[in-house]
Image: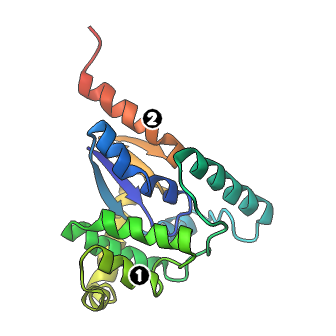
């Protein structure tokens, strides 16, 4: 099992979110979906990578486009960015992770965001993504806007920080951290090596 730490709002996380189901089916390796608020960590680190940096932002979108093509994905780029409702999107994700429907919700959120231009966390994306997971949007959104849900997202983010996580997507294999979509294959290889045991 690999812990998949992600924050809806991270652009590169689209590449991982959209292919984990297939990877899991092909490898038999499960992923535990762990949402958190990467924005608060990045602000704390004074790391705002693309705001007011047009050349770097242009590279990011082209890089995602290239990698998406390699994976057979077809986003419409640039997607709306940054997200106005990042925290709300992730508060829903924390609820979804607790109740067991996070993968469906997050995947639909990213699909609608990157492929239909609907910002995640805002309407109509958020309600449609909750409904896709078979839950009642009105009930879940009321819960997501509660003080308890806000505290739960803070707690999840603090847990991520305690594990040394500073960006999204991140993959944790026991105590080994792999940051970035381009390190997912390394995380898979590391887990397989651990499971196979030391060489004879």
* Image quadrant in which the N terminus is located: top left
Q: Which mark is residue 186?
A: 2
Q: Residue at x 51, y 54 (%)?
A: 15
Residue drawn 47% across the image and 67% down it: 111
The reply, left or right, for residue 134 in relation to residue 110 is: left
Q: CA separation, marks 1 and 2?
A: 32 Å
Q: How many marks?
A: 2
Residue 55: image location, x then y, percent: 80, 60
Mark 2 residue crowding within 10 angstroms, few (<14) / some (14–19) / many (20+): some
Quadrant placement of the C terminus: top left
Along the line of sight, the residue nearer the viewer: 68 or 81: 68
**Hey, which residue is sitting farthest right in the picture?**
55
Q: Quadrant of residue 145?
A: bottom left
What residue is disc 1 on? 126
Which residue is painted at 49% across and 47% down in the image?
A: 179
Q: Nearer the viewer, residue 136 or 11?
A: 136
Tell me how the rendering is colored. rainbow
Confirm or deny contact between disc 1 and disc 2 (CB under 8 A).
no
N-terminal of the pair, mark 1 or mark 2, is 1
Mark 1 neighbour density, 10 Å: few (under 14) some (14–19) many (20 or more) = many
Coordinates of residue 163 in the picture (x, y in percent): 36, 52
């Amino acid at each position: 099992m690999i812990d998949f730490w992600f924050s809806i709002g991270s652009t590169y996380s689209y590449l991982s979110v959209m292919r984990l189901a297939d990877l899991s089916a092909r490898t038999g390796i499960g992923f535990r979906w762990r949402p958190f608020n990467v924005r608060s960590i990045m602000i704390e680190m004074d790391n705002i990578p693309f705001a007011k940096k047009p050349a770097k932002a242009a590279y990011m979108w082209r890089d995602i486009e290239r990698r998406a093509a390699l994976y057979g994905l077809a986003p419409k780029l640039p997607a709306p960015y940054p997200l106005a409702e990042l925290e709300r999107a992730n508060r829903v994700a924390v609820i979804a992770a607790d109740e067991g429907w996070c993968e469906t919700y997050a995947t639909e959120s990213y699909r609608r965001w990157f492929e239909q231009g609907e910002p995640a966390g805002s309407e109509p994306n958020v309600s449609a993504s909750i409904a896709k997971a078979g839950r009642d949007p009105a009930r879940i959104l009321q819960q997501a806007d509660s003080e308890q849900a806000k505290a739960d997202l803070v707690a999840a983010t603090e847990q991520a920080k305690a594990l040394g996580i500073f960006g999204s997507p991140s993959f944790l294999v026991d105590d080994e951290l792999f940051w970035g979509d381009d390190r997912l294959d390394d995380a898979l290889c590391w887990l397989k090596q651990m499971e196979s045991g030391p060489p004879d």
